[in-house]
Image (cartoon, rainbow, N blue to C red):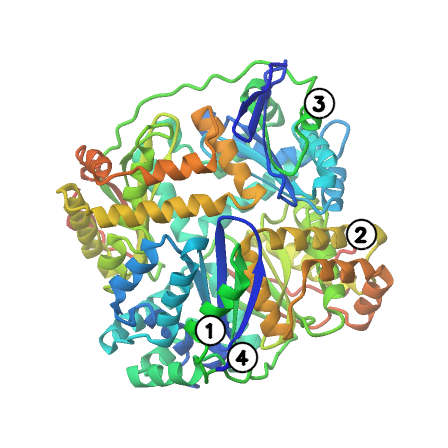
Amino acid sequence: MSRPEVQGRVRRATLPNGLTVLGEFDGHAETVALGYFVRSGARDELPQELGASHFIEHLLFKGSDRTSGRDLNLRLDALGASVNAFTSEETTVYHAACLPEAWAELLFLLTELMRPAFRDEDVEVERGVILEEIAMYADDPSSRTFDELHARAWGAHPLGHLVLGTPQTVANLTPERLRANFEARYAAGSVSLVASGLFDWDALLREADALTRGWPGGAFQRALSPHAFPRGVHVLPGPDLARANVALLAPGLRADHPHREAAVVLADILGGDNGRLYWSLVDSGLADSVDLSHVEFEEVGAFEGAWSCDPERAAPTLEIARAEFARVQEGSVTDAEVARARKKLAVSVALRAETPYARLFTLGMDHLYLGRTPSVTESVAAFERVSRRDVEALLAARPFDALTVVAHGPLAADLRATLKP
Amino acid sequence: MPGGLTVLFEPRSGPGFALELRLPVGAAHDPLGQEGTAALVEEWLHKGAGERDARALADAFDDLGLRRGGGVNHESTRFGIGGLSADFSRALQLLADTVRRPLLPKEELPTLLDLARQDLEGLADSPPDRLAVALRGRAFGAPYAHPASGTPGGLTAITPASARAWWRRHYGGRGAVLTVVGELREAEVFAQAGAAFGTWDGGGGELPEVSFHADFVAHEEGESQQTHLSALFSGVSPTEADWLAFHVALGALSGGSASRLFQEVREERGLAYSVSASASVTGGRGFAWAYAGSTPERAGETLSVLLGEFERLSAGIGEGEFERARAQLLTATVFGAESARGRASALARDWLSLGRVRLPAELRAELRALTRPHVNDFLARRPFTEAAVMTLGPAPLALPTLRSAHVPA
């Protein structure tokens, strides 16, 4: 294995098979968090196989050739461990936390998870669970609105792939295709084992090496492609709903962009608890909540926001939001607004580092997206450095002129005419 | 504090502090016919306080980068703040302004009432929320039957004068607790709490009794993809001796991936993505709430398995199940105390429900002393037989016959 690199409190090594092991020790912690971070997600799927990454995530909990899913669950529960996983457009993460004395058993079980058997009967039962999950989100108006927004904004770009897939694609995924996807995208070079909290680095590295020695090497190569969001306003009919959900998207910055902190500050100035959209839409009573955040991917980023309102207010609230976007683009952002937003974000970064479990996700995601793991102090400083000029530089590109908008609810058919693009 | 507020401080190292102010009043104290008052007042407080109008108040919190949380349920009203230790004193002053010296501008009230109306209408668009509201409305008597956000009629009846009178009567130090966790000096915490809240008197309110009507199966029509199912059982309150046994039993039922509900509903049959049962407290009484969502053609089986598993609990749990459920509760005491915010909240909850604080180590000792016979004795004495069951979906389900429900080996 490579000589471990030490960067602050973080150590990182690459095993001979290509697996990265990365850990941040905290002598004050009372727990340890472990996670396998896989650089693979919905964007890496073939269009006819949407939902494969998420299906694979579910099947990992069904056991390996030598350990049944039931046994895995029994042993994980016996540790009192908290275990879960998620799939996104670009990553799949298996994460857990336990008391320090149980770390070796937890690492064994998490690693066992990573060698799924893809038994036919397990695939069929889990297909039912996933179809229920799709139906559950289909009952949520906000999820429906965002799915439509993403379809409109991303078009054929792979970042528009639905993470859960569709009932049709999920119905068609065979054990063989799932296994083929797994083999193509879970090679050791695409996976990182991350640890945070109270653990022994040398022992972790030794165990990880022993447990993953049989893993095939290599790494999945992702195709990146630039994207221009199409401007437009779309109505998703929802005749039975009481309220309208409005969601919008505008171009932002990619995850490793040197000014991404400024984009996060801008999102807070506009869409935070004390942001401009709050005062114009919620304080005025026109909408019952509003938020805007900055989402980041490998080669592109976006501002995404949403609110819900009485159906007849969908058009007027959109006009008000547009007016707010126009005002910030005309140079009205103040030093005080920037100072407040960056302080709030800096404090939130500092406080989030409090538990090993929360720190695990920052470490893993920073590693995947930046190729390095800034210390908490560094991450705090990155926000504290953001100036009004940085925010204005972003706004000079007039990102909010290119809005993609979806309104969902009992909206008149002629609303699209009112909601001019 | 002289006015009646209890202040609890737990030191810990780290860059930040967390505090929670918890008042023993909430939606259960809404005046009859003015349901929604407690939640409305909590929103109204943020429309300006002390020398600051609404924007200046929000800016003052943000200038310090403070993270705010909180909310209103039937039993309590919570204000949580997290920030850097150096800003503790100013955070406390802002909180004192907010709850003791709010401007309560009457011109803001119509907007807040309209927002509450919108919030209620939004519940109708979410099948699980609509189900929870409907089940609460039917299973509990007043003043626990309405959602904390109020009722359409109740909101209409609230006036600036009635809401202001409610704030005067129920906000105060009596029965309330302020918890502080962080790297701060003890003497300083109490001195500053004294300066901010020492003379805060009055307030509080007796917790009304809750009446529970079980033994019904009802259905709400809804054009949803899934049929949403919920069951509410009588449980154990934190002041009862069986509290931990109840939690271990619920852990065996729904605590982890090997628990009975997860295994039988999801892992073995693939009937649902979401299935759970958890403990809750309403009006000082303990309950177990269960929920699952399944597409209509499978929902009948899901309900049958769910209710069958509750019934089967009365026969007791196995040694492995007991050990796993206990192990999860033991580690939960460690995870729960890890974050300052979580700890501040747990301290406040203990104080209001038990009148004392439990240290994680004390809870662990109690858990270690618990045995499987104790849990099984509890389950035999208090089986989960009577349930309030409600479903929401395109069509009512055929009533499950509990005795014939699936009983796994």
Distance CA(mark 3)–CA(mark 2): 30 Å
Q: Earlier in the sequence, mark 2 or mark 4?
A: 4
**Dot 2 amino acid type:** Glu
**Dot 4 amino acid type:** Gly
Q: Which residue is mark 2?
A: B323
- Tell whether B357 sits left or right of A148: right
Disc 3 is attached to a residue of which chain? A
Distance CA(mark 1)–CA(mark 2): 45 Å
Is circle 2 on the same chain as circle 4?
yes
Disc 4 is attached to a residue of which chain? B
Q: Nearer the viewer, mark 3 or mark 2?
A: 3
Is circle 1 on the same chain as circle 4?
yes
Tell me what residue is drawn at x 68 percent, y 31 percent: A200
User: Which image quadrant is residue A83 in?
Assistant: top right
Secondary structure beneath dot 3 equals helix
Disc 2 is attached to a residue of which chain? B
Quadrant in which the N terminus of chain A appears:
top right
Q: Which residue is mark 3?
A: A206
Secondary structure beneath dot 1 equals helix
Q: Nearer the viewer, mark 1 or mark 4?
A: 1
Q: Which residue is mark 4?
A: B175
Q: Do labels 3 and 4 touch, CB within 8 Å?
A: no
Tell me what residue is drawn at x 36 percent, y 66 percent: B94
- Tell whether B146 sits left or right of B156: right
Is circle 3 on the same chain as circle 4?
no
- Residue B44, which numbered label? none
Please indicate, yes or no, whether residue B339 appears anywhere in the rendered image. Answer: yes
Secondary structure beneath dot 4 equals loop
Distance CA(mark 1)–CA(mark 4): 16 Å
Distance CA(mark 3)–CA(mark 4): 55 Å
